[in-house]
Image: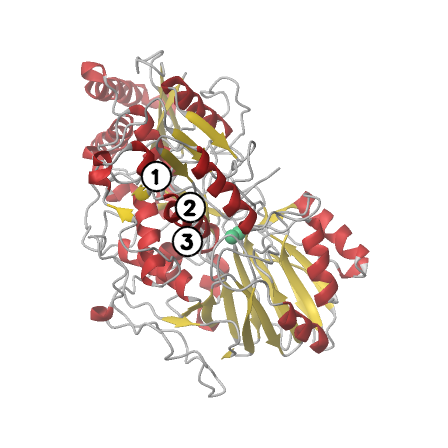
């Protein structure tokens, strides 16, 4: 499996991905055909581990406050990186990464859309723009018998809150020693098809809330969504400084700006530097991955040296910057690495991954061979891929046009920070794309995962304002398939064939390489670092076990491979002995519905009690995919709201209302899916409140058959 979990789709709104079918399982409730029911959201089936009303915090919205973390270095050492490039928290000192009107966007364009922009969340009512507890938390382990942790003295604790047990998922990990906590990364994952209406999933931060006063900093390894996507939701609750490299900081800042979040403080760290944060000394290490500015973290703690390898591959000829700093790894090895935590994503792949330079050459060959227009679709975070395309454009005398909001945004950030080298005049204004002959045009777009509403999907359906893909065009999908997106990608490819376009994927040519090291690369680094202990991260259980087996072949003792999943705790004592503690901290998933883009000045975290207080109310329409015609009467499911049998009148009224909203949104033959779902939620909410004076969480879903 060639997964690229680090590279999440460009679209900030997976709701718009063409998942086709939404599965809302409930005992006896509606099920889409060909779908395995996964019980969830049943009243008797409460989410495991994250459903207790523990320690409710009134989420402070420290929008205008300075970070209120503790003074940084309790020992008086100023962080080395401070002042280098840090962004002070003053409001009027906001970074100006976006020259192209990004920062003024206070309202999303909603249904009207803004052709020419990438897929993005539609405006949603604030009522819905709030996180919810996950109905299903696959790896939750905390239970009622959870012990609230009192910091064990002089013990290093390592706790994954997210990212351990699933691929590409909401990475977040805690290092804790006495009074100091570091949080590494704060990522999202995109929801499963059975989380209707949900945009993102983030890790439960209850543990951090319970230990808020000890949190010293976030340290961020790189700018992929599964490592930074949760910042707009999480950081306002823990407004401590964020240590990371420039590009990553740029990406996070862009998110903060979109959410109207202020008061953040970045402390830029680079390989070769050293910063002291509480009990931890951090040395960023040059690694390679599918994004520039990936940092490995050498963390010196009172119990020993930890190497936090984050996501990585070995690329001796990367597209950007320097290759993996093996000299530094060897130096760490000489000092003695107590424990390495590493990406396990690529563990099932034999051999070595392709170098980006090979990919670059393959892309160039395509450019030379193609006569018509060329559309390259990739992830917007693949700055390296963008650079290849820019280089190939320069060599073949073509002009580049960017399609998709996230593509433009990331390109702008990367250009301003000097990561992308673009010859003057090479990137053109998309509005002028049709004034050039076809063989002079390259379009780089989002949509390689088949996301509905993405630039590629709109260009192929004639909905894009400036470009319509036609016979003679060549479309290059320069990415791999994220599991779960197969159907949507197939659909896109078929559409392109229907139009008569040529399609090239990485199956045919080496136009894509994974960002995660394969087995030989992993052996290589393990052999150099020689850690005493190994904790596999970023993968599922199978990969963790395989990683452990491989590690043993390189000389790590079997009992020193510590396989833990989210919420489990590894403890190292001062003698450097590591154990998996019996303690489990609360973990789980929090669903984010609504991006908060429309709520400038409002952080979209609401208190999480809505569901506990007023229950949940689901409205499900089953319709014909093509015509949007209702196939059956709307299905209504409620839990914890009213007893259905005694509320026939209320439910009957809800059905009638649902039908009316459906009729309104399908009039004239064209179906406004998003508007339909939005109207359902909002009007149903009002209706229920009028009838009952309660505000259950209303979830609407449209199942297309
Ligand atoms: Zn990752
Ligand atoms: Zn990554």
Residue that carries the numbered disc 3 in the rendered image: 230
Q: CA distance from mark 2 to mark 1?
A: 10 Å
**1 or 3: tag closer to the N-terminus:** 3
Q: At numbered mark 1, what does the secondary structure look like: helix, strand or loop?
A: strand
Near mark 2 (Cα within 10 A), the count class, few <14, some 14-19 or many ≥20, is: many
Q: Quadrant of the N terminus?
A: top right
Q: Nearer the viewer, mark 3 or mark 2?
A: 2
Q: Nearer the viewer, mark 2 or mark 1?
A: 2
What residue appears at the point 36 percent right and 63 percent down from the top-left corner? 418
- When asked about the image quadrant of residue 632, the answer is top left
Q: Which mark is residue 613?
A: none
Q: Are marks 2 and 1 in contact (CB under 8 Å)?
A: yes
Near mark 3 (Cα within 10 A), the count class, few <14, some 14-19 or many ≥20, is: many
Q: Position of residue 13 (x, y in %)?
A: 35, 40
Q: Position of residue 221 (x, y in %)?
A: 50, 62
What residue appears at the point 43 percent right and 23 percent down from the top-left corner? 491
Q: Are marks 1 and 3 in contact (CB under 8 Å)?
A: no
**2 or 1: tag closer to the N-terminus:** 2
**3 or 2: tag closer to the N-terminus:** 3
Q: CA distance from mark 3 to mark 2?
A: 35 Å
Q: At numbered mark 3, what does the secondary structure look like: helix, strand or loop?
A: loop
Residue that carries the numbered disc 2 in the rendered image: 392
In the orientation shown, which residue stands out farthest toward the bottom? 76
Q: Report the coloring of the rendering.
A: secondary structure
Q: Position of residue 492 (x, y in %)?
A: 42, 26
- When asked about the image quadrant of residue 611, the answer is top left
Residue that carries the numbered disc 1 in the rendered image: 442
What residue appears at the point 32 percent right and 44 percent down from the top-left corner? 400
Question: In the rendered image, is residue 230 in sight?
Answer: yes
């Amino acid at each position: 499996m060639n997964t690229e979990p680090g590279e999440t789709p460009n679209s900030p709104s997976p709701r718009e991905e063409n998942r086709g079918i939404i599965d809302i399982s409930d005992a006896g409730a509606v099920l889409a055909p060909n779908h395995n029911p996964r019980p969830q959201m049943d009243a008797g089936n409460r989410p495991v581990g994250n459903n207790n009303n523990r320690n409710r915090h009134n989420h402070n919205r420290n929008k205008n406050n300075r970070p209120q973390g503790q003074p940084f270095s309790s020992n008086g050492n100023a962080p080395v990186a401070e002042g280098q490039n840090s962004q002070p928290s003053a409001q009027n000192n906001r970074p100006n990464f976006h020259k192209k009107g990004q920062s003024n966007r206070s309202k999303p364009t909603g249904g009207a859309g803004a052709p020419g922009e990438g897929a993005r969340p539609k405006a949603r009512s604030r009522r819905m723009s709030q996180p919810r507890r996950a109905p299903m938390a696959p790896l939750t382990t905390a239970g009622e018998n959870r012990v609230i942790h009192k910091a064990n003295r002089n013990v290093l604790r390592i706790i994954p809150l997210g990212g351990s047990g699933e691929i590409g998922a909401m990475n977040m990990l805690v290092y804790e020693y006495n009074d100091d906590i570091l949080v590494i990364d704060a990522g999202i994952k995109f929801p499963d098809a059975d989380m209707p209406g949900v945009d993102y999933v983030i890790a439960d931060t209850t543990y951090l809330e319970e230990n808020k006063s000890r949190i010293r900093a976030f340290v961020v390894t790189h700018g992929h969504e599964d490592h930074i996507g949760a910042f707009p939701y999480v950081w306002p609750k823990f407004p401590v400084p964020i240590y990371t490299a420039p590009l990553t900081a740029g990406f996070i800042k862009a998110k903060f700006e979109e959410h109207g979040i202020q008061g953040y403080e970045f402390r830029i760290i680079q390989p070769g530097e050293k910063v002291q944060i509480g009990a931890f000394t951090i040395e960023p290490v040059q690694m390679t991955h599918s994004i520039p500015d990936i940092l490995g973290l050498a963390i010196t703690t009172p119990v020993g040296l930890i190497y936090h390898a984050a996501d990585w591959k070995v690329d001796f000829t990367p597209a950007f910057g320097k290759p993996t700093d093996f000299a530094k790894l060897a130096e760490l090895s000489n000092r003695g690495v107590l424990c390495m935590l590493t990406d396990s994503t690529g563990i099932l792949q034999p051999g070595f991954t392709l170098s980006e330079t090979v990919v670059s050459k393959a892309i160039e060959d395509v450019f030379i061979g193609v006569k018509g227009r060329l559309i390259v679709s990739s992830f917007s975070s693949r700055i390296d891929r963008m650079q290849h395309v820019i280089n190939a454009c320069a060599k073949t005398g073509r002009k580049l046009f960017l399609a998709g909001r996230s593509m433009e945004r990331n390109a702008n950030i990367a250009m301003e920070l000097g990561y992308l080298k673009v010859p003057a005049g090479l990137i053109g204004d998309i509005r002028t794309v049709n004034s050039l002959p076809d063989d002079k045009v390259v379009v780089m777009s989002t949509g390689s995962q088949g996301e509905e509403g993405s630039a590629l999907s709109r260009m192929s359906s004639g909905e894009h304002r400036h470009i319509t893909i036609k016979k003679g065009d060549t479309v290059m999908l320069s990415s791999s398939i994220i599991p779960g997106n197969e159907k949507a990608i197939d659909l896109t490819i078929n559409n392109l064939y229907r139009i008569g376009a040529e399609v090239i994927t990485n199956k045919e040519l080496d136009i894509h390489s994974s960002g995660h090291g394969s087995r030989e690369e992993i052996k290589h680094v393990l052999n150099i670092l020689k850690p005493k202990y190994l904790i596999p991260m970023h993968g599922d259980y199978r990969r963790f076990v395989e990683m452990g087996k491989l590690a043993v072949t390189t000389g790590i003792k079997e009992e020193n491979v510590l396989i833990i999943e989210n919420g489990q705790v590894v403890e190292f004592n001062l003698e450097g002995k590591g154990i998996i503690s019996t303690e489990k901290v609360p973990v789980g998933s929090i669903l984010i519905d609504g991006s908060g883009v429309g709520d400038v000045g409002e952080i979209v975290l609401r208190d999480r009690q809505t569901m506990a207080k007023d229950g949940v109310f689901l409205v499900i329409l089953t319709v014909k995919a093509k015509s949007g015609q209702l196939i059956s009467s709307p299905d209504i499911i409620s839990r914890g709201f009213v007893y259905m049998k005694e509320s026939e009148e209320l439910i009957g009224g809800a059905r009638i209302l649902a039908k009316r909203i459906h009729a309104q949104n399908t009039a004239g033959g064209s179906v406004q899916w998003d508007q339909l779902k939005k109207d359902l939620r909002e009007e149903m909410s009002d209706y229920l409140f009028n009838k009952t004076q309660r505000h259950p969480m209303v979830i609407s879903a449209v199942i297309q058959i």
